[in-house]
C-alpha cells in the first residue's frame, strides 16, 4: 500500500494531458488476486534477462551439431555464451542477453554490438531437456534467410514487441543501429490495459470517467476491443508503426493478414504460424460475442476450467451460457460430454473441434475456428477433413476458386454474397476477385469499399485497383478513411496512377503519412521499396535508386528489390548496370526462379533472345507450377519456331486463361493450314 500511495503522490505532483507509463510495482496494492495469478505465467516470463533461474538450457560446454552448422553452448565471466557461425560464415563467440519463453521450448537472443538482438536458430526443449534446430530438414546455413544472423531472425523487429511492454525499436537508419527500449520485460499490466497514469489519477480522485482512466475497457461491451487487444500479439500481422498504442483500433497500428494460401488451408484452418486471431474471427463463437477471457484467465493465461469444462460453460444440458454478454441463441440443451455426442471413445471437445499443429518443432497450438469435424473420420484424421465440405460451403468452394474450376466464378460470387460470411473471409475472397473479372465482381468490390470492417475495405481497395487501375473517383475518398491501414492501402494503390487535382489535399496528407510509416520501418527492405515507389510517383527520381539500393543493403534476401532496381536502371538507359544487378542476385540465389524470370524478361528487352530463352527455361525448371513463367517460356519457344514445344508446355496449364487462349489460337492456325 505504501508503494501505491507514493505512486499516487508522484502522479498528482506531475499530471500530464496524455496517459503515461507508470511503475507497476503499485498495481498489486489494489489488484492482489490478479497480480498473484500473473506471477510465473507465460506472459510474465515471456522475456527475461539471461541469469541463474531464467536460463533453462544446458550451457555446460555442450556442442550441438546441426544439419549444416555446429553451435557450442558455454559459460564465461558469469554469462551465457554460444560459439556459432555468424553472418560472415565464420564461427565466433556471441553473448546470450535474454531468454525467450519458458515452455515447451526456450529460445535465446544473442546481442550484437549494433543493438541488434538476434534469435538463435537452436532452442532448448524444456520437456525432453535437449537442444534442437527450429528449421529441421531445411539445411539452414549462414547464406539462408532463416539463419539466426539474418534480418528475418532480427528480434528487434520480429519478436520483442510481443514479449515486452511498451517496446520501441528506435531504429537509427543513419548508422543502421537499434536503440531499443521497453517499459518492462514480459507482458505486464500496461501491455494490455495501456499506460496507467490516468488510472492512478482516477484512483486518487474518483469520478464518472469511463474505463477508470484507461483508454478502453477490456470487459463488457463489444468483444472486438478485447479480441483486438490480444490480436496485437496473437495474430499474423504487419506493423504500421514503431510500437503499439493500447486502446487504438487494431488496423491503426497493424494490418492482419487475410487467409492467404501459404498461411491458411483453403477452408480457413491454420497452416503456417498464424497464431489464433485469424481463425477465431472466422468462428461462430466470435460472432456470438465470445471473447478470449471467456475461456482463458487473462492474468494467468491458463484455461478457466480443466479439459472440456471450458466448452461446457455454454455447451451444456441447460442450453445457456454462463456469460450474459454471449448471445446464447442457437445453443442446444444437450449433454455434450457423452458418447452419444462424440461417438469416439476418449475424444474431447478440443481434440475434435480444435485440432492442433506443431510450430517451432514442438509447440502444439490449437486452431480457434471451432468448426465441425467431418462425420465418420477418426480423430487423428480430423485436421485435413475438419468441416464437412457440403456443396456451397466456404470449405467446398475455396479450393475450386483457387484451382480454377469451371464453376470458380460462380462459387466466388456465391461466397462473396453470403451475408453470414465473416469479414476476414470476405477480405480473402476479394483478393481472389481480380482473377475472375466481371461487371458483377467489380460492383461487389466497389460496394466493399464502404464495408464496416476496415480489413474488408483494405482488400476492396486492392481488388478495385487491380480490376480498374488508377480510379481516383473510387479510391480517392479512401485517403480520408478514419483507419490508418485503409488510408495507407489507398496511397499504395494510387502510387502508379496519374495525379488527380480533385484529391490533391487528401493525397498530400496521406502520402506524407505513408512516407512517415515507411520511415518508421526503415530497418526493413520492404519499406525502402515502398519509399522508392513513393518517390517515383512524386517525380523525385534522384531518390528512387538510392532507396532500392538501400533495400538490397538491408536484406539481400529480399529479391523484389533487385528485380525492381534492374527494371529502373533499364528504363533509365543503363542496361549494362541493370543486367549486372540481376546477375549478382542470381549468383547469390541460384535457386530463385523469380530472378531467372526477371532476367529472362530483361534480356527480351535488351534483344538478347538466346539469354532470355535460357533464363526463362531455368525459371520454369525451378518453379514448374508457375503458369506465368511457363507462358513466357512458351512465347520464347514460338520466337524460336518451336510451335510443338510451345503447345506441349501450354497444355500443362489448362486453368491459366492466357495459356488457354494462346493454345486455342495455335490450334486455329493449325486448322487454317
Image: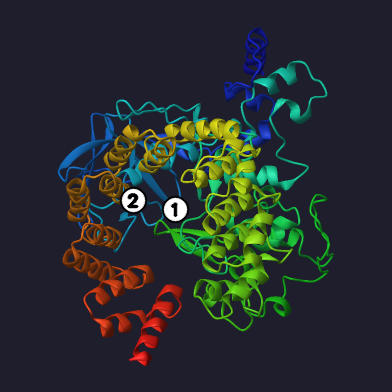
Q: Percent x, y for residue 22? A: 59, 21
Q: Quadrant of the C terminus?
A: bottom left
- Can residue 299 be seen in this snapshot? no
The residue labelled by disc 2 is 560
Which residue is at a point 23% across and 81% down the rendered structure image? 642
Number of the label disc, if any, that sits on residue 518: none
Q: Quadrant of residue 636?
A: bottom left
Q: Nearer the viewer, residue 63 or 272?
A: 272
* Depicted 203 relative to depicted 446: above or below: above
* Depicted 211 relative to depicted 454: above or below: above
| Residue 298 as seen in the image, left or right of residue 637 | right
Q: Secondary structure at mark 2?
A: helix
Q: Nearer the viewer, residue 129 or 206?
A: 206
Q: Percent x, y for residue 210? A: 78, 29
Q: Quadrant of residue 614?
A: bottom left
The residue labelled by disc 1 is 104
Q: Secondary structure at mark 1?
A: loop
Circle 2 packing at 10 Å, graded few (<14), some (14-19), many (20+), is some
Q: Quadrant of the N terminus?
A: top right
Amino acid at each position: 500500500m505504501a508503494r501505491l500511495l507514493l505512486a499516487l503522490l508522484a502522479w498528482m505532483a506531475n499530471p500530464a494531458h496524455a496517459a503515461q507509463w507508470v511503475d507497476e510495482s503499485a498495481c498489486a496494492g489494489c489488484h492482489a488476486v490478479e497480480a498473484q495469478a500473473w506471477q510465473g505465467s507465460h506472459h510474465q516470463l515471456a522475456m527475461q534477462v539471461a541469469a541463474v533461474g531464467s536460463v533453462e538450457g544446458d550451457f555446460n560446454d555442450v556442442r550441438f551439431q546441426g544439419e549444416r552448422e555446429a553451435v557450442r553452448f558455454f559459460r564465461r565471466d558469469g554469462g551465457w555464451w554460444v560459439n556459432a557461425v555468424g553472418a560472415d560464415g565464420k564461427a565466433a563467440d556471441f553473448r546470450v542477453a535474454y531468454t525467450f519463453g519458458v515452455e515447451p521450448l526456450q529460445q535465446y537472443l544473442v546481442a550484437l554490438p549494433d543493438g541488434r538482438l538476434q534469435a538463435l536458430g537452436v532452442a532448448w526443449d524444456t520437456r525432453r531437456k535437449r537442444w534442437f534446430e527450429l528449421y529441421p530438414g531445411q539445411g539452414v546455413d549462414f547464406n539462408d534467410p532463416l539463419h539466426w544472423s539474418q534480418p528475418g531472425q532480427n528480434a528487434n523487429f520480429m519478436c520483442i514487441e510481443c514479449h515486452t511492454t511498451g517496446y520501441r525499436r528506435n531504429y537509427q537508419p543513419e548508422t543502421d543501429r537499434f536503440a531499443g527500449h521497453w517499459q518492462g520485460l514480459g507482458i505486464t499490466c500496461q501491455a494490455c490495459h495501456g499506460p496507467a497514469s490516468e488510472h492512478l489519477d482516477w484512483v486518487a480522485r474518483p469520478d464518472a470517467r469511463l474505463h477508470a482512466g484507461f483508454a478502453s475497457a477490456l470487459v463488457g461491451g463489444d468483444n472486438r476491443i478485447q479480441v483486438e487487444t490480444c490480436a496485437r500479439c496473437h495474430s499474423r500481422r504487419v506493423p504500421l508503426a514503431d510500437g503499439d498504442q493500447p486502446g487504438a483500433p487494431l488496423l491503426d497500428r497493424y494490418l492482419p493478414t487475410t487467409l492467404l494460401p501459404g498461411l491458411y488451408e483453403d477452408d480457413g484452418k491454420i497452416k503456417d504460424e498464424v497464431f489464433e486471431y485469424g481463425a477465431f474471427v472466422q468462428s461462430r463463437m466470435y460472432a456470438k460475442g465470445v471473447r478470449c477471457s471467456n475461456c482463458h484467465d487473462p492474468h494467468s493465461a491458463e484455461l478457466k476450467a480443466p479439459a472440456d469444462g471450458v466448452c461446457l460453460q455454454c455447451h451444456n444440458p441447460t442450453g445457456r451460457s454462463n456469460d450474459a454478454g454471449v448471445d446464447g441463441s442457437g445453443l442446444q440443451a444437450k449433454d455434450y460430454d457423452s458418447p452419444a455426442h462424440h461417438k469416439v471413445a476418449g475424444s474431447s471437445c478440443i481434440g475434435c473441434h480444435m485440432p492442433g499443429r506443431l510450430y517451432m518443432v514442438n509447440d502444439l497450438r490449437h486452431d480457434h475456428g471451432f468448426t465441425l469435424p467431418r462425420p465418420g473420420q477418426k480423430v487423428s484424421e480430423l485436421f485435413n477433413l475438419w468441416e464437412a465440405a457440403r456443396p456451397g460451403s466456404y470449405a467446398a468452394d475455396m479450393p475450386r476458386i483457387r484451382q480454377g474450376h469451371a464453376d470458380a466464378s460462380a462459387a466466388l460470387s456465391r461466397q462473396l454474397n453470403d451475408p453470414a460470411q465473416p469479414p476476414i473471409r470476405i477480405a480473402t475472397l476479394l483478393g481472389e476477385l481480380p482473377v475472375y473479372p466481371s461487371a458483377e465482381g467489380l460492383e461487389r468490390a466497389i460496394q466493399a469499399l464502404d464495408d464496416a470492417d476496415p480489413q474488408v475495405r483494405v482488400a476492396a481497395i486492392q481488388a478495385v485497383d487491380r480490376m480498374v487501375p488508377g480510379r481516383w473517383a473510387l479510391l480517392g475518398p479512401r485517403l480520408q478513411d478514419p483507419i490508418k491501414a485503409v488510408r495507407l492501402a489507398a496511397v499504395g494503390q494510387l502510387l502508379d496512377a496519374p495525379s488527380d487535382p480533385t484529391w490533391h489535399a487528401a493525397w498530400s496528407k496521406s502520402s506524407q503519412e505513408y512516407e512517415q510509416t515507411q520511415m518508421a520501418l526503415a530497418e526493413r527492405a520492404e519499406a525502402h521499396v515502398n519509399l522508392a515507389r513513393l518517390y517515383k510517383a512524386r517525380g523525385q527520381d534522384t531518390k528512387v535508386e538510392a532507396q532500392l539500393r538501400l533495400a538490397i543493403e538491408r536484406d539481400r534476401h529480399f529479391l523484389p528489390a533487385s528485380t525492381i532496381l534492374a527494371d529502373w536502371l533499364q528504363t533509365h538507359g543503363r542496361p549494362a548496370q541493370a543486367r549486372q544487378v540481376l546477375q549478382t542476385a542470381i549468383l547469390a540465389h541460384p535457386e530463385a526462379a523469380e530472378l531467372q524470370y526477371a532476367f529472362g524478361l530483361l534480356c527480351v528487352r535488351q534483344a538478347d533472345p538466346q539469354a532470355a530463352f535460357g533464363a526463362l527455361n531455368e525459371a520454369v525448371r525451378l518453379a514448374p507450377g508457375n503458369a506465368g513463367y511457363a507462358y513466357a517460356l512458351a512465347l520464347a519457344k514460338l520466337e524460336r519456331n518451336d510451335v510443338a514445344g510451345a503447345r506441349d508446355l501450354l497444355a500443362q496449364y489448362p486453368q491459366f486463361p492466357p495459356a488457354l487462349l494462346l493454345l486455342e489460337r495455335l490450334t486455329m492456325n493449325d486448322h487454317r493450314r
